[in-house]
Image: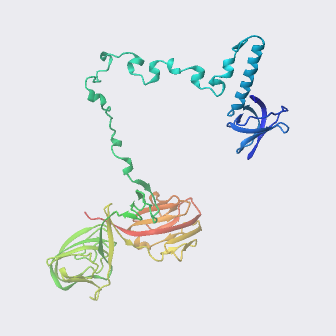
Amino acid sequence: MSVVREFPSVTLTNNNNLVQINTNDSNFSVVPGSVIFIAGDRPRVVTSGDTVNRTLTLAIAYTGNDIVEKSATLIPLGQNDALLAAITSLTEAQNGLAEAYGDGPGTVGEISFSMIVDPPVTATQWPTWVQVQGDINEVLPETAKRFPNFPEIGGKVSVEQLPDDIDTDNKRTQALSPPVRQNASLTHILSDYPTLKKTVDIPTQSPNNKREMLFDDVRQVAYVALTDEWLPISNIVEKREFLLTTNGKRIWFNSAYTGSLTLRVYPMGNGGTGLPDNPALDDYQWHTVTTTLTSVTSFGSSFVGLIDYIETDDGFETLSTARSRFPSIDAYYGESDGSKAPNQFMRFTLRQDGDWYSEDVMPATPYSMGASWAQDAQDPRLFSVNEASGGTDALRIFSDSWDKFDFEMLVVSTVPKPMALTNSNTPEYTIPFEGVYRFIIENERLYFKRQAAFAPLTGAIRIESLRLRVKAYE
């Protein structure tokens, strides 16, 4: 009959149903349905054994990492009919032995034949906890079988022991949650706020349905993400055109005019020269002048600058319509010989900072370039510099006649060393490292060169935009 066997060392390999016994112990016949317990693995059913080869055959092939030289225990479970047959034979033999010695069926020494013939449940299966230890509920206290109430754990609490702010009589207040202290910073749902990002790259691709805003601190533009595109938030308050007058051209009346004349003008270099009575005006500032004309056919022959409006006794004309004829004052813009002049209107935008900015005035060809500088043939705004070391080996946009103008310039630089934008090398006009920069140039020369003590310069700059900047009038 099979009994529990201990094997100190067995081996089992992947996809194999043979358990190899590594010791010299001879094997034995295995009761079908016996179970082998191998250390580190789950129990497995054994169908047969081979005494010669010292192997046990599993009902199902083993799959997994190889088990090498592990201890195992073989237990005859599942097939109890052989065990009961053996017990029956033993009982008959014991009964015969008792009769032979004059002792009736019942006991032989300390053995109870009733226990052999009718064994207890715990002898034929794995016992349960109750069978071994008894019913634990019979020994546990009542409070261990359920959730205890407070007096059972901590003792009885009287009303006098409770804090004053606990209302024990009002059942409704006892059921309410305690108040939550509000924090001002948490009064909004944070997920409702868009993601804010700073950037200097103009967005071109879809934001993929994300709620985002991009802030371009350099170009002073913001973008809001729509479903499949970016919507730029303009910083422009107003758009209009100003008449930009130049030397030799003037305002002509269709017939000689006598009466009051009021102008708002922005001189750009010659002050009030060329206007009626040649008033003394500061350049690059707005001025409103009033005078009286007598049989005047034209004015402004040498005035250089912007004219905002003209007012006569007959009417008022804002010069923002990009046309040379002004019917409300019976006048037009013409050449020195009286013929109509070409359109000289320039478009400006009024931004939130309170200044007017012209359309781009970057020339197709710069005024001058040093020997180390070159202009890109495909992108005329892109200029490269190679080992420029001299103070005059520079890029110059305009001649001296433009030095008094105010400009806004956007520059993209890949020059790694500090570079000065003007002759003065002042910090506010210096590009300290590679990047995107916005400069407001006031009465300075547009001149890219090495900064003192930093040479040579190698890299490239791209002038993204160059605009005249005009102070807004009060």
Colouring mode (rainbow / by chain / secondary structure / one colour): rainbow
> Looking at the image, can residue 120 be seen?
yes
> Looking at the image, can residue 216 be seen?
no
How many labels, in total? 0
Vertical comparison of 39 with 342: above or below: above
When asked about the image quadrant of residue 275, the answer is: bottom left
When asked about the image quadrant of residue 236, the answer is: bottom left
Q: Camera-side residue: 327 or 85?
A: 85
The image quadrant where one finds the C terminus is bottom left
Q: How far across and how far down the image is residue 439, in percent?
A: 43, 62
Q: Camera-side residue: 294 or 325?
A: 325
The image quadrant where one finds the N terminus is top right
Q: How far across and how far down the image is residue 130, in percent?
A: 57, 23
Q: How far across and how far down the image is residue 196, in percent?
A: 41, 54
Q: How far across and how far down the image is residue 59, in percent?
A: 71, 42
Left or right, 53 with respect to 201, comes to: right
- Residue at 77% across / 16% down in the picture? 97
Q: Camera-side residue: 357 or 149?
A: 149
